[in-house]
Amino acid sequence: MKVEHLAIWTYNLEGMRSFYMHYFDASSSEVYHNHSREYRSYFLSFDGDCRIELMEMPGIPKSRDNTLKQFTGLIHFAFKLGSKSKVHELTETLRKDGYKIISEPRTTGDGFFESVFLDPDGNRVEIMA
């Protein structure tokens, strides 16, 4: 069994699509547009089998959670970059480009090397060696 995709509601469909294509080399499907529901979406594919579905539709409430605090539900997703140097490099690129780093590159107590930042919508994204 595999995770096939994660879905994210957004009010910034094109910006989120561009972000993941630029920083994570995602390839994108063509836009799907359901005119009667005013719904649009893209599937983003990465190296591997898991995809992200970005979705936009009027009337979806914005999260009221503070993205800098923990909360119940899905709290983050992670990309494996393959090395500590790649984690350091992407963390610094994201910082330089104005993205909020909420956990600096470090080795966790359970032995993982990682960093955590907020994407353009405030979703926590972890990058791992």
Image (spheres, grey):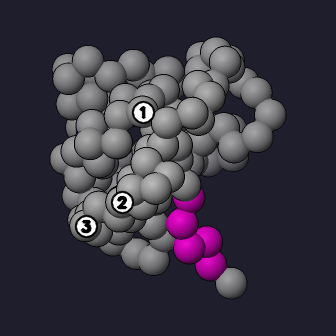
How far is mark 3 from mark 1, CA to CA? 18 Å
Q: Provide residue 100's location: percent of width, then percent of height.
A: 39, 19
Which quadrant: the N terminus?
bottom right
Local SS, label 3: loop
Rendered image: mark on residue 30 = 3
Q: Provide residue 116's location: percent of width, then percent of height.
A: 48, 33
How far is mark 2 from mark 1, CA to CA? 15 Å
Q: Is residue 27 visible?
A: yes
Which of the two marks, 2 or 1, is nearer to us in this view?
A: 2
Residue 77 located left or right of residue 43 = right
- The tally of labels here is 3
Above or below, comparing residue 127 to residue 62 in the picture: below
* Nearer to the camera, 6 or 104: 6
Q: Is residue 104 visible?
A: no
Disc 1 crowd, CA 10 A, few/some/many (<14, 14-19, 20+): some
Q: Residue furthest front?
A: 36
Q: Provide residue 36's location: percent of width, then percent of height.
A: 46, 56
Magenta stretch in the rendered image: 2-6
Tell whether label 3 touches label 2 (CB within 8 Å): no
| First-in-chain label (3 vs 1) | 1
